[in-house]
Each structure stands twice: as structure tokens, then as C-alpha cells.
Image (cartoon, coloured by chain):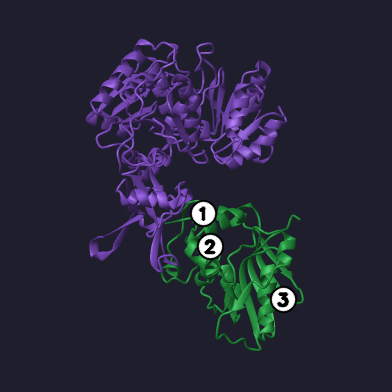
Chain colours: A purple, B green
Amino acid sequence: MVIDFAVQSFLTGRLWLREHIPFNSNIIDAHIATGNIKVIPGIKKEKSFLYKTIFQCNRCQNNTPSRFTVFDCAKCEGPCVYCRHCLKMGRVSYCTTLIAWNGPEPAFPKSHLLAWEGKLTPLQQIASHELFESTIRNRPHLIHAVCGAGKTEILFKPIYKMLLKGKRVCIAAPRVDVILELEPRLRVAFPTTKIAALYGGAIVENELSQLILATTHQLYRFQEAFDVIFVDEADAFPYTADETLRRAVKKAAKENAPIHSVTATPSKKLLYQMRREGSVSTINRRFHGYSLPVPRYESLWNYSAKIKKKKLPMKLIKWTEQRLIKEEPFLIFFHNIILMEEAEPLFKTLDRRIKSVHASNENRKEFVQKLRDKEIPGLLTTTILERGITIPNVQVAVVGAEHGIFTSGALVQIGGRVGRSSVYPSGDFVLFHHGISHAMDDAKREILRLNKGGASL
Amino acid sequence: MTECLLCDVELLTKPSWKTLLALDDEMVLCRECLSEFKLSNQQIENPTLKKVTSLYEYNDAMRDYLHQYKFLQDIALAKVFKYELHNVLKSKTNIIPIPMHPNRKVKRTFSHVEELLKCARISYSDVLEKKDDETMGKKSKIERLALAPLFRLKPEVVIKNESYMLIDDIYTTGTTLRHAAALLIEAGAREVEAVTLIRARLND
């Protein structure tokens, strides 16, 4: 039995479209013949109540009937069906096949280096220890730590210990920005470990990586791959809204492998579930020991009408000018793209370098870096930058904080951008509003509660 | 509950007797996505083709649409322009789609022009055959003009002394359509018109 190690490295833990495999068809056929590669049909058909056919995509686990299209296929010469949910990763239809590695598991290296030299605070240390305890007991664990508590550092030790055992580890996050932020930090922390960062548009490496950082979407393409998965920002959109993403994480984990969650703003459901089935570590102090910035309310009546008339409200101009004079980097959050784009030219009259970013903006990564490097004084943004980014001394304003998109969790996250570094442990966090919403009060109450030491909910 | 075929936003439709009885148009796109497409109305005339009507201009939205429809093979998108195509073609006869080479059709699993017509509920006759499986998109303008005949008639097909209507997805230089039209006229067609979904602007 001959095994091609390149094929083995590529396919271990993966679930890949046969047509997209970067190897010669003959090699794949030979491995299928020897049973080292398993062939899985793209779509599973099942009969249900009243003989209605139910489809499930074997890659993304989607089973919503409206997300499938039945068609007359010229390839299999008959009625066929494909999944529209994961279409962008290459179409999976009834007549396409997915392949997965079924042969002997490659051995992962057991010598690694943890080059991170920082020191954990006592609270971080306890959480890190508890997280590792849960990991070896295959029990899900929730790290509930305020923004800026140093969540990533808490993960280092447990990850390191798992790597030393030759285990495969995954850090998944619903947002690509989080992955982009984590990648350089983990590469520095684990300089000798093979690390891959996977997100839409990233180059797929053929090497076998032991530590994988991936958007939860990318986990559609994994199956029984990881000994432990850490889901960072587990409450972020779209992870909570799209059930297939949660199924994908489960599918990517090996049997009984623990799936941990890390977030500053867990939903009540997640908290309850973790308390019942797993365990929870709570940290309500930032790593530098200072309090979380408390939001300040500032009325901004009829702001959207004013902006539509091409006039910036006076309060907003004053706030922005102050930031410009003091040379403090700033972020201004908007609830919708159209309003933000209308406001952008108005802000440009204050400073030409001000830019705006949103979800489909390709320069997002570059602009955030420029803000850090002080080449740009400030950014206008949608909620896309609400989490995962760290900019020293950043000041934050929310325009239209009363809007439904700013849930209390989102506001806590946005406030969490402020005062993250120990050099600048505080900063302005202002909510410009057209009326105070319950979410704003909830967020303020939550922050005050955490600052008092996190007494009961 | 239906979603926009392009951006997955939920479509809000009010229930009414009209929709219940299927008299109303079925919504497939949201307003935002629909407004991205730009109508063209461009008509071109030349010796072999009496008239070429293109419905839309080629813009970013159209590029993304074609990419998802043809390359990501999202057949559901054939529905997007069904009313527009139906309105242009409902009174026409002798409709002939530009064919794909059989190998390419198997690879794509469907013929994109025929699917557009099927969704628009337009009956067509499939009388042409593609001779080799090269694509236009990869050729320069000079190469396109100097091509050997691209199509042939299927065996036992009779072309009458009538007006014929060719259908293609995109009009770029017009080479494809001219080849097909010349073949039909040679076989006895009185005149040939064409409708394409998109009119592309050439850079060279």
C-alpha cells in the first residue's frame, strides 16, 4: 500500500471537492482503490414525512429546502440538485463527490516553542488553568472575559500543552478581521509550529498544519480534524444566526473533542448552556487593572436629517475637531452604510485623510493599520470593526446609538475598543443618540456592574 | 419566505390574492440588487444581422451576476431576468439559442442560454451545433474576426424563408452572432435578428 505523503498532508481532516483537489486524478483514484481516501456524495437525500425528499449538503450541513435548487443536469443526465449555501466554495451537487482522508493519521510534531514572554495576571492564570483542565477532560469551557482582559494570552498555555501532546488545534472566529488580528500574534508566540490561517481569499497551503486559525465558514471544509477547537468571539454575527456554522464547528471537531467559547459578551443562552454542560471562567478586570470606560450619552437630535442636508451636527464637529487637535486616533460607528457614506465627504472637510470602512471594503485591513500608524487620524465604520481590533489611545463615538443594530452586546464590544493599552488605559466613549434605548442603558449597567467587580447578574 | 437570489436578504412580500393565484410577478431579487443592473436598450445594425437588441449594460453587478451564474454554476440565477426576456421575446418566432459545445455543456452541467429561455417560458429550437470547444472570451479582437466558421446546422434541419431570432448572453464584438447569422442566411433564412442579455463595452 503506497501512500503519497503530499496527498495525506493535504487531505487529513479535510473534506474537499474532488474536482478542486490539487493532485492528479490517477493518484486520487489509486488512494480510493486502497481505501485511503473515502468518497462521500455531495448531497444526502432522505425521504421524510409524506415521502417528501429532504436534502442535506454534506459539506456545509445546510438542510433548508429553499437553499437547494433542483435542475436538469447535463453531466449526470437527469434531475440533480445543488446546495446554494456554500456555492462560493465551489458548487456541491448530487453528482459531485467530496473526498476525505481515510488512511493512517500522520504524526504531528511534539516539540514546540512558546515564545511569548509576557506575564499573565492572577485572574488570567486561573482562567488559563481552568481552560486546560476542561480541555483534558473533554468538557466545553467558556472564557467570559471583558474586552481587553487579554483573552488571547489565556489561550496560549492550553494551546501549547495540546501541541506538545501532538494534538491538532483550531482557533475559529466568525469574522475574518479577528483571524487577521490573531495570525501575527500566534506566529510570534509559536515560532516553530506549522500554522495556517484560512479565510475567504486566503491561499490554500498544501502543507499539514498543526495549528489552524480559520473563519467558521472555512470549517465547512473540515471533518473530524481537531482535538480541540476554540471559538473566539462566539457571540458574533453570523455565528449565532447561522446554524450551519455551529454544525460546521461540531463536524470539524473529532469525536468527543471539546469546543470552547471565548467572548466578552456571551448570550444568556450560551452562559446557561455552558454552566450546565461545561464550565465557565469569568474575568471582569482588564489586564492592566483599570476600569472599563463608561459610555457617556450625548443627544444628537435629527442627526440623519441633518447629514442628509449635507450638514454635520455641531456636537459631532466639535468632538471630531478635539480629537484632531489632540492627535488622538478615533473611530466613529454608524448604523448603516448609506448614512456613513453621506457623512464621509462632510468629515473630509475637517480632515481630508478621514476614511470610511464597511464589510465589503477591501482596504479595511490597510486602513486600520494606517490608523495605528497615525497616517489616518480617524475612521468612519459600520459595526464591522466592533470587535477584535486594538488601537492604542483610540477614542470612540457611536452615531445613532439608539438604533436596533447596536444591541447591548455590540455597545459593550464597541466600548471595549477604548483604553486597551496600559499606557492609555482610558478614553472617551460617547454615544450620540436621538433618544436613549434600552440597549444603551443595558450596556451602561453591564459595564458599571463589571467595574464594580462583576456582582451577580 | 423567500430570499433575494443574490444577497440572501429576506424578501418582504405582502400576501395578496394576486400572488396566491400566481397572477403577480414572482420576486426573485431585492430592490437594492435589482437597481444595480443598468438597462441598455442599445440596438445595432449591420449587413448580416438586421438588428441586435441588448437588454442590459455590462457593469460590476452584471459581472458578478455572470460569474455566479456561469462559473459558480448557480442555475437558480437563470430566473433573474425571466420577465424582461419574456417581454422581449413573447411575440417572436423561430428562436434559436447560441449553442455550447457538448463537452463544455457537460462540464458546466447546463447550457446557460437555454436555461435563460426556459425560465422565461420561451420555446426555442435547438438547430445549431458548436464546432469546437474554444471560447470567445480568451481571444483578442483580431483573432475573433479571422475565425473559421464556428457553427454548423444539425443534421436534417430545414431553414425556411422566414425571420429568425438568435439569443446569446453577451454581445462583445458580435463575432459569434455574425457567424451564426451568416450560416442561417446561407441556409435560406430571410433575415436574422438577435437579442442578447448584455451589451459589453470593448476596451481595445
Indicate the quadrant where residue B67 lies. Answer: bottom right
Res. B6 mark: 1
The residue lying at 36 percent from left, 39 percent from top is A12
CB under 8 Å between discs 1 and 2: yes
Q: Quick one: SS at disc 2?
A: loop
| Residue where numbered disc 3 is placed | B49
Q: Is residue A329 above or below residue A201?
A: above
- Report the quarter where the N terminus of chain A lies: top left
Marks 3 and 2: same chain?
Answer: yes
Residue A37 is tagged as: none
The chain that hosts pointer 2 is: B
The outermost residue toward the bottom is B161
Residue B80 circle label = 2
Give the vertical position of A258 relative to B110 (above or below): above
Label 1: how many residues lie within 10 Å, few (<14), some (14-19) or many (20+)?
Answer: some
What residue sits 77% from the left and 77% below the top? B47
Q: What secondary structure is found at the residue carrying circle 1?
A: loop
- The number of numbered discs placed on residues in the rendered structure image is 3
Looking at the rendered structure, whether the residues under marks 1 and 3 are on a common chain is answered as yes
Decide: few, some or many residues near mark 3? Use Cα within 10 Å; few <14, some 14-19, many ≥20: many
Chain ID at mark 1: B
Please indicate, yes or no, whether residue A333 appears anywhere in the rendered image. yes
Q: Residue at x 46, y 29 (%)?
A: A411
Question: Which amino acid type is shown beneath numbered disc 3?
Answer: Leu
Q: Residue A217: where, in percent of width, then height?
A: 42, 41
The location of residue B38, given as percent across then percent down, is 65, 58
Q: Name the amino acid type tagged 1.
A: Leu
Q: Compared with residue A363, is residue A96 higher up or lower down, i.e. above or below?
A: below
Q: Nearer the viewer, residue B65 or B83?
A: B65
Query: How far separated are the C-alphas under marks 1 and 2?
Result: 9 Å
In the rendering, at what x and y percent does residue A286 appear? 42, 16
